[in-house]
Amino acid sequence: MTAVTPELDGRAAWPAAEFTARLRAVTATRYHDRHPFNQRMHRGELTPAELRRWIAARFHYQRHIPVKDALILAGLDRPEERRAWLRRIHDQDGTDASGGGIERWLRLGEAAGLDREELWDASRVPPGVRFAVEAYVTFCRRRPVLDAVAASLTELSAPDLMRTRIAAFEHHYPWIEAAGLAYFRTRVTQGARDAEQALALVLARARTPEEQQRAVTALEFKCEVLWALLDAVDRSGP
Amino acid sequence: MTAVTPELDGRAAWPAAEFTARLRAVTATRYHDRHPFNQRMHRGELTPAELRRWIAARFHYQRHIPVKDALILAGLDRPEERRAWLRRIHDQDGTDASGGGIERWLRLGEAAGLDREELWDASRVPPGVRFAVEAYVTFCRRRPVLDAVAASLTELSAPDLMRTRIAAFEHHYPWIEAAGLAYFRTRVTQGARDAEQALALVLARARTPEEQQRAVTALEFKCEVLWALLDAVDRSGP
Protein backbone atom coordinates (compact mmCIF):
# COMPACT_ATOMS: atom_id res chain seq x y z
CA MET A 1 0.00 0.00 0.00
CA THR A 2 2.80 2.42 -0.77
CA ALA A 3 1.73 3.31 -4.31
CA VAL A 4 2.50 6.94 -4.95
CA THR A 5 -0.60 8.75 -6.17
CA PRO A 6 0.00 11.91 -8.23
CA GLU A 7 -0.86 14.35 -5.45
CA LEU A 8 1.61 12.67 -3.08
CA ASP A 9 4.46 12.56 -5.54
CA GLY A 10 7.35 14.51 -4.16
CA ARG A 11 5.68 16.35 -1.29
CA ALA A 12 6.94 16.02 2.27
CA ALA A 13 4.92 14.53 5.09
CA TRP A 14 2.49 16.94 6.77
CA PRO A 15 3.66 18.34 10.11
CA ALA A 16 1.77 16.80 13.04
CA ALA A 17 -0.57 19.79 13.42
CA GLU A 18 -1.62 19.76 9.78
CA PHE A 19 -2.02 15.98 9.73
CA THR A 20 -4.18 16.19 12.87
CA ALA A 21 -6.27 18.98 11.33
CA ARG A 22 -6.85 16.88 8.21
CA LEU A 23 -7.98 13.91 10.31
CA ARG A 24 -10.30 16.14 12.35
CA ALA A 25 -11.68 17.65 9.15
CA VAL A 26 -12.82 14.18 8.08
CA THR A 27 -14.96 13.61 11.16
CA ALA A 28 -16.11 17.25 11.20
CA THR A 29 -17.61 16.84 7.73
CA ARG A 30 -18.48 13.13 7.43
CA TYR A 31 -19.32 11.84 10.91
CA HIS A 32 -22.76 10.28 11.31
CA ASP A 33 -24.01 13.08 13.56
CA ARG A 34 -24.95 14.75 10.24
CA HIS A 35 -26.97 11.81 9.00
CA PRO A 36 -30.68 12.66 8.54
CA PHE A 37 -31.72 9.73 10.76
CA ASN A 38 -29.46 10.92 13.57
CA GLN A 39 -30.75 14.47 13.18
CA ARG A 40 -34.34 13.24 13.38
CA MET A 41 -33.39 11.24 16.48
CA HIS A 42 -31.88 14.25 18.20
CA ARG A 43 -34.84 16.47 17.28
CA GLY A 44 -37.14 13.98 19.00
CA GLU A 45 -38.86 12.87 15.82
CA LEU A 46 -38.32 9.13 16.00
CA THR A 47 -41.20 6.83 16.86
CA PRO A 48 -40.58 4.25 19.59
CA ALA A 49 -40.37 1.58 16.85
CA GLU A 50 -37.73 3.57 14.98
CA LEU A 51 -35.72 4.15 18.14
CA ARG A 52 -35.81 0.43 18.99
CA ARG A 53 -34.69 -0.39 15.44
CA TRP A 54 -31.73 1.95 15.85
CA ILE A 55 -30.82 0.49 19.25
CA ALA A 56 -30.92 -3.07 17.87
CA ALA A 57 -28.79 -2.08 14.85
CA ARG A 58 -26.23 -0.26 16.97
CA PHE A 59 -26.06 -3.25 19.33
CA HIS A 60 -24.94 -5.33 16.36
CA TYR A 61 -22.17 -2.76 15.87
CA GLN A 62 -21.29 -2.63 19.59
CA ARG A 63 -20.91 -6.39 19.97
CA HIS A 64 -18.28 -6.36 17.22
CA ILE A 65 -16.16 -3.60 18.77
CA PRO A 66 -14.11 -6.00 20.94
CA VAL A 67 -13.58 -8.17 17.85
CA LYS A 68 -12.04 -5.27 15.92
CA ASP A 69 -10.02 -4.30 19.00
CA ALA A 70 -8.70 -7.87 19.30
CA LEU A 71 -7.67 -7.68 15.63
CA ILE A 72 -5.83 -4.41 16.30
CA LEU A 73 -4.23 -6.05 19.36
CA ALA A 74 -2.96 -8.85 17.08
CA GLY A 75 -1.26 -6.19 14.94
CA LEU A 76 0.68 -4.59 17.80
CA ASP A 77 4.15 -5.97 18.34
CA ARG A 78 5.14 -5.03 21.88
CA PRO A 79 3.61 -5.88 25.28
CA GLU A 80 3.38 -2.19 26.30
CA GLU A 81 1.43 -1.32 23.13
CA ARG A 82 -0.93 -4.22 23.64
CA ARG A 83 -1.45 -3.41 27.33
CA ALA A 84 -2.58 0.10 26.35
CA TRP A 85 -5.05 -1.18 23.73
CA LEU A 86 -6.34 -4.09 25.83
CA ARG A 87 -8.14 -1.60 28.08
CA ARG A 88 -10.69 -1.05 25.31
CA ILE A 89 -11.68 -4.71 25.37
CA HIS A 90 -12.09 -4.49 29.14
CA ASP A 91 -14.21 -1.36 28.72
CA GLN A 92 -16.55 -3.04 26.26
CA ASP A 93 -16.67 -6.61 27.67
CA GLY A 94 -16.36 -5.69 31.34
CA THR A 95 -14.05 -7.42 33.78
CA ASP A 96 -16.89 -9.51 35.23
CA ALA A 97 -20.52 -10.29 34.43
CA SER A 98 -21.67 -6.94 35.84
CA GLY A 99 -20.40 -5.76 32.58
CA GLY A 100 -18.96 -3.13 30.35
CA GLY A 101 -20.22 -1.29 27.29
CA ILE A 102 -22.01 -4.28 25.77
CA GLU A 103 -23.93 -4.87 28.99
CA ARG A 104 -24.79 -1.16 29.20
CA TRP A 105 -26.09 -1.26 25.63
CA LEU A 106 -28.23 -4.32 26.45
CA ARG A 107 -29.70 -2.31 29.35
CA LEU A 108 -30.44 0.60 27.02
CA GLY A 109 -32.31 -1.90 24.84
CA GLU A 110 -34.25 -3.20 27.83
CA ALA A 111 -35.09 0.35 28.90
CA ALA A 112 -36.52 0.85 25.40
CA GLY A 113 -38.59 -2.34 25.56
CA LEU A 114 -36.32 -4.84 23.74
CA ASP A 115 -35.29 -8.08 25.35
CA ARG A 116 -31.74 -9.40 25.40
CA GLU A 117 -32.31 -12.36 23.13
CA GLU A 118 -33.82 -10.08 20.49
CA LEU A 119 -30.67 -7.97 20.64
CA TRP A 120 -28.31 -10.95 20.38
CA ASP A 121 -30.32 -12.40 17.48
CA ALA A 122 -28.36 -11.14 14.47
CA SER A 123 -30.88 -12.62 12.03
CA ARG A 124 -33.21 -9.74 12.91
CA VAL A 125 -30.62 -7.10 12.03
CA PRO A 126 -31.16 -5.48 8.57
CA PRO A 127 -28.71 -6.83 5.97
CA GLY A 128 -27.27 -3.36 5.29
CA VAL A 129 -26.36 -3.03 8.98
CA ARG A 130 -24.72 -6.47 9.02
CA PHE A 131 -22.78 -5.69 5.84
CA ALA A 132 -21.51 -2.36 7.17
CA VAL A 133 -20.31 -3.96 10.42
CA GLU A 134 -18.75 -6.86 8.52
CA ALA A 135 -16.94 -4.38 6.25
CA TYR A 136 -15.44 -2.68 9.29
CA VAL A 137 -14.31 -5.93 10.94
CA THR A 138 -12.87 -7.22 7.65
CA PHE A 139 -11.00 -3.93 7.17
CA CYS A 140 -9.40 -4.34 10.61
CA ARG A 141 -8.59 -8.00 9.89
CA ARG A 142 -6.94 -7.40 6.52
CA ARG A 143 -5.36 -3.96 6.63
CA PRO A 144 -2.19 -2.85 8.40
CA VAL A 145 -2.72 -1.91 12.02
CA LEU A 146 -2.13 1.80 11.22
CA ASP A 147 -5.24 1.80 9.02
CA ALA A 148 -7.34 -0.01 11.63
CA VAL A 149 -6.27 2.40 14.39
CA ALA A 150 -6.88 5.42 12.13
CA ALA A 151 -10.38 4.09 11.40
CA SER A 152 -11.10 4.20 15.14
CA LEU A 153 -10.55 7.98 15.12
CA THR A 154 -14.26 8.63 14.66
CA GLU A 155 -13.92 8.70 18.47
CA LEU A 156 -12.60 12.24 17.98
CA SER A 157 -16.19 13.36 17.44
CA ALA A 158 -17.91 10.81 19.68
CA PRO A 159 -17.85 12.65 23.04
CA ASP A 160 -19.69 15.69 21.62
CA LEU A 161 -22.23 13.40 20.00
CA MET A 162 -22.73 11.55 23.30
CA ARG A 163 -23.38 14.80 25.19
CA THR A 164 -25.92 15.95 22.60
CA ARG A 165 -27.57 12.53 22.61
CA ILE A 166 -27.96 12.34 26.39
CA ALA A 167 -29.71 15.74 26.38
CA ALA A 168 -31.89 14.74 23.41
CA PHE A 169 -32.95 11.46 24.99
CA GLU A 170 -33.73 13.05 28.35
CA HIS A 171 -35.79 15.76 26.68
CA HIS A 172 -37.54 13.92 23.85
CA TYR A 173 -37.74 10.30 24.93
CA PRO A 174 -38.56 10.36 28.65
CA TRP A 175 -40.17 6.91 28.30
CA ILE A 176 -36.61 5.53 28.25
CA GLU A 177 -35.46 5.34 31.87
CA ALA A 178 -32.45 7.54 32.68
CA ALA A 179 -30.49 4.47 33.87
CA GLY A 180 -30.67 3.18 30.29
CA LEU A 181 -28.43 6.06 29.16
CA ALA A 182 -25.40 4.81 31.15
CA TYR A 183 -23.66 3.70 27.94
CA PHE A 184 -23.66 7.25 26.55
CA ARG A 185 -22.50 8.79 29.84
CA THR A 186 -19.57 6.37 30.13
CA ARG A 187 -18.47 7.02 26.55
CA VAL A 188 -18.07 10.78 27.08
CA THR A 189 -14.86 10.23 29.05
CA GLN A 190 -13.82 6.85 27.56
CA GLY A 191 -14.22 8.19 24.02
CA ALA A 192 -12.05 11.24 24.69
CA ARG A 193 -9.31 9.12 26.22
CA ASP A 194 -9.49 6.50 23.45
CA ALA A 195 -9.34 9.16 20.73
CA GLU A 196 -6.28 10.77 22.31
CA GLN A 197 -4.50 7.41 22.56
CA ALA A 198 -5.34 6.41 18.97
CA LEU A 199 -4.32 9.81 17.62
CA ALA A 200 -0.92 9.54 19.31
CA LEU A 201 -0.45 6.08 17.81
CA VAL A 202 -1.42 7.29 14.31
CA LEU A 203 0.87 10.33 14.54
CA ALA A 204 3.76 8.10 15.62
CA ARG A 205 3.23 5.45 12.93
CA ALA A 206 2.18 7.48 9.88
CA ARG A 207 5.49 9.10 8.95
CA THR A 208 5.44 9.19 5.14
CA PRO A 209 2.97 11.11 2.95
CA GLU A 210 1.60 7.73 1.79
CA GLU A 211 1.01 6.50 5.33
CA GLN A 212 -0.63 9.77 6.33
CA GLN A 213 -2.93 9.60 3.30
CA ARG A 214 -3.79 5.99 4.16
CA ALA A 215 -4.79 7.11 7.66
CA VAL A 216 -7.07 9.82 6.25
CA THR A 217 -8.60 7.33 3.82
CA ALA A 218 -9.15 4.82 6.61
CA LEU A 219 -11.00 7.43 8.65
CA GLU A 220 -13.14 8.34 5.64
CA PHE A 221 -13.92 4.65 5.20
CA LYS A 222 -15.01 4.39 8.84
CA CYS A 223 -17.32 7.38 8.41
CA GLU A 224 -18.85 5.54 5.44
CA VAL A 225 -19.42 2.48 7.63
CA LEU A 226 -21.29 4.49 10.27
CA TRP A 227 -23.25 6.40 7.61
CA ALA A 228 -24.23 3.22 5.72
CA LEU A 229 -25.39 1.69 8.99
CA LEU A 230 -27.79 4.59 9.56
CA ASP A 231 -28.94 4.45 5.93
CA ALA A 232 -29.85 0.80 6.46
CA VAL A 233 -31.73 1.57 9.69
CA ASP A 234 -33.54 4.45 8.04
CA ARG A 235 -34.68 2.36 5.07
CA SER A 236 -35.52 -0.88 6.85
CA GLY A 237 -38.62 0.40 8.61
CA PRO A 238 -42.22 0.90 7.65
CA MET B 1 -14.62 -27.32 6.38
CA THR B 2 -17.42 -29.89 6.82
CA ALA B 3 -16.38 -32.22 4.00
CA VAL B 4 -17.07 -35.80 5.03
CA THR B 5 -13.96 -37.93 4.62
CA PRO B 6 -14.55 -41.67 4.09
CA GLU B 7 -13.60 -42.72 7.62
CA LEU B 8 -16.04 -40.18 9.10
CA ASP B 9 -18.93 -41.14 6.87
CA GLY B 10 -21.79 -42.33 8.97
CA ARG B 11 -20.11 -42.71 12.34
CA ALA B 12 -21.36 -40.86 15.41
CA ALA B 13 -19.32 -38.26 17.28
CA TRP B 14 -16.90 -39.69 19.85
CA PRO B 15 -18.08 -39.49 23.46
CA ALA B 16 -16.19 -36.81 25.41
CA ALA B 17 -13.87 -39.35 27.08
CA GLU B 18 -12.82 -40.92 23.81
CA PHE B 19 -12.40 -37.54 22.11
CA THR B 20 -10.25 -36.35 25.03
CA ALA B 21 -8.17 -39.54 24.88
CA ARG B 22 -7.57 -39.02 21.16
CA LEU B 23 -6.42 -35.44 21.75
CA ARG B 24 -4.13 -36.55 24.56
CA ALA B 25 -2.73 -39.30 22.34
CA VAL B 26 -1.58 -36.64 19.87
CA THR B 27 0.54 -34.79 22.40
CA ALA B 28 1.68 -38.05 24.03
CA THR B 29 3.20 -39.20 20.74
CA ARG B 30 4.08 -36.00 18.86
CA TYR B 31 4.91 -33.31 21.43
CA HIS B 32 8.35 -31.73 21.12
CA ASP B 33 9.58 -33.25 24.37
CA ARG B 34 10.53 -36.22 22.13
CA HIS B 35 12.55 -34.11 19.74
CA PRO B 36 16.28 -35.09 19.71
CA PHE B 37 17.31 -31.49 20.42
CA ASN B 38 15.03 -31.30 23.47
CA GLN B 39 16.31 -34.66 24.68
CA ARG B 40 19.90 -33.48 24.34
CA MET B 41 18.95 -30.32 26.24
CA HIS B 42 17.44 -32.27 29.10
CA ARG B 43 20.39 -34.68 29.25
CA GLY B 44 22.66 -31.68 29.72
CA GLU B 45 24.42 -32.09 26.39
CA LEU B 46 23.88 -28.63 24.91
CA THR B 47 26.77 -26.21 24.67
CA PRO B 48 26.15 -22.68 25.99
CA ALA B 49 25.94 -21.49 22.35
CA GLU B 50 23.28 -24.09 21.54
CA LEU B 51 21.28 -23.23 24.62
CA ARG B 52 21.38 -19.52 23.75
CA ARG B 53 20.28 -20.33 20.20
CA TRP B 54 17.32 -22.26 21.58
CA ILE B 55 16.40 -19.44 23.99
CA ALA B 56 16.50 -16.86 21.19
CA ALA B 57 14.38 -19.05 18.90
CA ARG B 58 11.81 -19.77 21.59
CA PHE B 59 11.65 -16.05 22.40
CA HIS B 60 10.53 -15.48 18.82
CA TYR B 61 7.77 -18.01 19.48
CA GLN B 62 6.88 -16.49 22.88
CA ARG B 63 6.50 -12.94 21.56
CA HIS B 64 3.88 -14.18 19.09
CA ILE B 65 1.75 -15.98 21.68
CA PRO B 66 -0.30 -12.85 22.57
CA VAL B 67 -0.81 -12.28 18.83
CA LYS B 68 -2.36 -15.72 18.34
CA ASP B 69 -4.38 -15.25 21.55
CA ALA B 70 -5.70 -11.91 20.24
CA LEU B 71 -6.72 -13.69 17.01
CA ILE B 72 -8.56 -16.34 19.05
CA LEU B 73 -10.17 -13.52 21.06
CA ALA B 74 -11.43 -12.01 17.79
CA GLY B 75 -13.12 -15.33 17.02
CA LEU B 76 -15.06 -15.52 20.29
CA ASP B 77 -18.55 -14.05 20.14
CA ARG B 78 -19.56 -13.34 23.74
CA PRO B 79 -18.03 -11.11 26.43
CA GLU B 80 -17.83 -13.96 28.97
CA GLU B 81 -15.86 -16.14 26.51
CA ARG B 82 -13.49 -13.29 25.70
CA ARG B 83 -12.98 -12.40 29.39
CA ALA B 84 -11.87 -15.99 30.04
CA TRP B 85 -9.39 -15.98 27.15
CA LEU B 86 -8.08 -12.46 27.76
CA ARG B 87 -6.32 -13.70 30.90
CA ARG B 88 -3.76 -15.41 28.66
CA ILE B 89 -2.75 -12.09 27.11
CA HIS B 90 -2.36 -10.63 30.60
CA ASP B 91 -0.25 -13.62 31.60
CA GLN B 92 2.10 -13.18 28.66
CA ASP B 93 2.23 -9.37 28.37
CA GLY B 94 1.90 -8.58 32.06
CA THR B 95 -0.43 -5.96 33.47
CA ASP B 96 2.40 -3.44 33.89
CA ALA B 97 6.03 -3.08 32.86
CA SER B 98 7.17 -5.49 35.61
CA GLY B 99 5.94 -7.97 33.18
CA GLY B 100 4.50 -11.33 32.29
CA GLY B 101 5.76 -14.32 30.38
CA ILE B 102 7.57 -12.29 27.71
CA GLU B 103 9.48 -10.34 30.35
CA ARG B 104 10.35 -13.58 32.18
CA TRP B 105 11.64 -15.05 28.94
CA LEU B 106 13.79 -11.96 28.34
CA ARG B 107 15.24 -12.49 31.83
CA LEU B 108 15.99 -16.12 31.01
CA GLY B 109 17.86 -14.83 27.97
CA GLU B 110 19.80 -12.36 30.10
CA ALA B 111 20.63 -15.09 32.63
CA ALA B 112 22.07 -17.07 29.70
CA GLY B 113 24.15 -14.13 28.46
CA LEU B 114 21.89 -12.69 25.71
CA ASP B 115 20.85 -9.08 25.73
CA ARG B 116 17.30 -7.87 25.18
CA GLU B 117 17.89 -6.21 21.84
CA GLU B 118 19.41 -9.41 20.48
CA LEU B 119 16.27 -11.24 21.53
CA TRP B 120 13.90 -8.68 19.97
CA ASP B 121 15.93 -8.64 16.74
CA ALA B 122 13.97 -11.09 14.58
CA SER B 123 16.51 -10.83 11.75
CA ARG B 124 18.83 -13.04 13.81
CA VAL B 125 16.24 -15.80 14.15
CA PRO B 126 16.80 -18.76 11.77
CA PRO B 127 14.36 -18.70 8.82
CA GLY B 128 12.92 -22.11 9.72
CA VAL B 129 11.98 -20.78 13.18
CA ARG B 130 10.36 -17.69 11.69
CA PHE B 131 8.43 -19.77 9.18
CA ALA B 132 7.14 -22.18 11.83
CA VAL B 133 5.94 -19.32 14.04
CA GLU B 134 4.39 -17.56 11.05
CA ALA B 135 2.58 -20.77 10.09
CA TYR B 136 1.06 -20.97 13.57
CA VAL B 137 -0.06 -17.32 13.62
CA THR B 138 -1.49 -17.60 10.09
CA PHE B 139 -3.37 -20.76 11.09
CA CYS B 140 -4.98 -18.88 14.00
CA ARG B 141 -5.77 -15.92 11.73
CA ARG B 142 -7.41 -17.94 8.95
CA ARG B 143 -9.00 -20.99 10.56
CA PRO B 144 -12.17 -21.22 12.62
CA VAL B 145 -11.66 -20.48 16.29
CA LEU B 146 -12.25 -24.15 17.20
CA ASP B 147 -9.13 -25.11 15.24
CA ALA B 148 -7.05 -22.34 16.81
CA VAL B 149 -8.13 -23.29 20.34
CA ALA B 150 -7.52 -27.00 19.63
CA ALA B 151 -4.02 -26.12 18.42
CA SER B 152 -3.32 -24.58 21.84
CA LEU B 153 -3.87 -27.98 23.47
CA THR B 154 -0.16 -28.78 23.36
CA GLU B 155 -0.52 -27.17 26.80
CA LEU B 156 -1.85 -30.57 27.91
CA SER B 157 1.75 -31.79 27.94
CA ALA B 158 3.47 -28.53 28.84
CA PRO B 159 3.38 -28.71 32.67
CA ASP B 160 5.21 -32.07 32.74
CA LEU B 161 7.77 -30.72 30.29
CA MET B 162 8.27 -27.60 32.46
CA ARG B 163 8.90 -29.69 35.58
CA THR B 164 11.44 -31.87 33.77
CA ARG B 165 13.09 -28.81 32.30
CA ILE B 166 13.48 -26.97 35.60
CA ALA B 167 15.21 -30.04 37.09
CA ALA B 168 17.42 -30.44 34.00
CA PHE B 169 18.48 -26.79 33.99
CA GLU B 170 19.24 -26.76 37.71
CA HIS B 171 21.31 -29.93 37.39
CA HIS B 172 23.07 -29.50 34.06
CA TYR B 173 23.27 -25.77 33.43
CA PRO B 174 24.08 -24.22 36.81
CA TRP B 175 25.71 -21.27 34.99
CA ILE B 176 22.15 -20.03 34.31
CA GLU B 177 20.98 -18.28 37.47
CA ALA B 178 17.96 -19.88 39.17
CA ALA B 179 16.00 -16.61 38.86
CA GLY B 180 16.18 -17.01 35.09
CA LEU B 181 13.96 -20.09 35.33
CA ALA B 182 10.92 -18.11 36.56
CA TYR B 183 9.20 -18.51 33.17
CA PHE B 184 9.20 -22.31 33.47
CA ARG B 185 8.02 -22.25 37.09
CA THR B 186 5.09 -19.97 36.28
CA ARG B 187 3.99 -22.10 33.34
CA VAL B 188 3.59 -25.26 35.47
CA THR B 189 0.36 -23.90 36.97
CA GLN B 190 -0.65 -21.51 34.16
CA GLY B 191 -0.25 -24.27 31.56
CA ALA B 192 -2.42 -26.73 33.49
CA ARG B 193 -5.16 -24.15 33.91
CA ASP B 194 -4.95 -23.01 30.27
CA ALA B 195 -5.10 -26.59 28.99
CA GLU B 196 -8.17 -27.35 31.11
CA GLN B 197 -9.94 -24.21 29.85
CA ALA B 198 -9.09 -24.88 26.20
CA LEU B 199 -10.10 -28.53 26.47
CA ALA B 200 -13.52 -27.54 27.86
CA LEU B 201 -13.96 -25.11 24.99
CA VAL B 202 -12.99 -27.71 22.37
CA LEU B 203 -15.28 -30.35 23.92
CA ALA B 204 -18.17 -27.86 23.89
CA ARG B 205 -17.63 -26.67 20.32
CA ALA B 206 -16.58 -29.83 18.48
CA ARG B 207 -19.90 -31.70 18.35
CA THR B 208 -19.83 -33.46 14.99
CA PRO B 209 -17.34 -36.14 13.86
CA GLU B 210 -16.00 -33.62 11.35
CA GLU B 211 -15.39 -30.95 13.99
CA GLN B 212 -13.75 -33.45 16.32
CA GLN B 213 -11.47 -34.64 13.53
CA ARG B 214 -10.58 -31.02 12.73
CA ALA B 215 -9.59 -30.47 16.37
CA VAL B 216 -7.32 -33.54 16.30
CA THR B 217 -5.78 -32.37 13.02
CA ALA B 218 -5.22 -28.86 14.43
CA LEU B 219 -3.38 -30.32 17.41
CA GLU B 220 -1.25 -32.48 15.11
CA PHE B 221 -0.45 -29.33 13.11
CA LYS B 222 0.64 -27.51 16.27
CA CYS B 223 2.94 -30.39 17.22
CA GLU B 224 4.47 -30.05 13.73
CA VAL B 225 5.05 -26.33 14.37
CA LEU B 226 6.91 -26.98 17.63
CA TRP B 227 8.87 -29.86 16.08
CA ALA B 228 9.85 -27.84 13.00
CA LEU B 229 11.02 -25.02 15.26
CA LEU B 230 13.40 -27.37 17.07
CA ASP B 231 14.56 -28.86 13.75
CA ALA B 232 15.48 -25.34 12.63
CA VAL B 233 17.34 -24.61 15.88
CA ASP B 234 19.15 -27.93 15.67
CA ARG B 235 20.29 -27.35 12.08
CA SER B 236 21.14 -23.67 12.27
CA GLY B 237 24.21 -24.06 14.43
CA PRO B 238 27.84 -24.89 13.78
Image (cartoon, coloured by chain):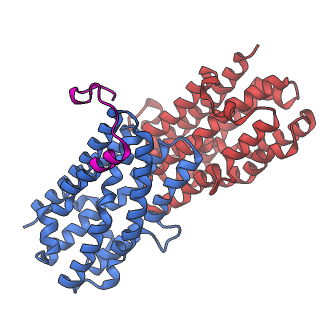
Chain colours: A blue, B red
A118 left or right of B21 in image: left
B60 left or right of B150 in image: right
Seen as rendered, the residue at the extreme left is A238
Q: Between residue A68 and residue A6, name the one nearer to us.
A: A6
Count the numbered circles shown. 0
Give x and y (percent) for residue A101.
40, 68
Task: State which quadrant residue B221 falls in.
Answer: top right
Image height of A113 relative to B109, above or below: below
Residue at horizontal 29 percent and vertical 37 percent from the top:
A213
Seen as rendered, the residue at the extreme top is B238
A215 left or right of B223 in image: left
Image height of A232 relative to A142, above or below: below
**Can residue B167 be seen at all in this image of the molecule?**
yes
Residue at horizontal 59 percent and vertical 57 percent from the top:
B87
Q: Quadrant of the N terminus of chain B?
A: top left
Give x and y (percent) for residue B169.
86, 37
Task: State which quadrant residue A117 falls in.
Answer: bottom left
Residue A18 in magenta stretch: yes
**Can residue B30 be seen at all in this image of the molecule?**
no
Give x and y (percent) for residue B237.
74, 16
Residue at horizontal 43 percent and vertical 40 percent from the top:
A205
Q: Between residue A163 and residue B8, name the one nearer to us.
A: A163
Instruction: Identify the magenta region.
Output: A1-22
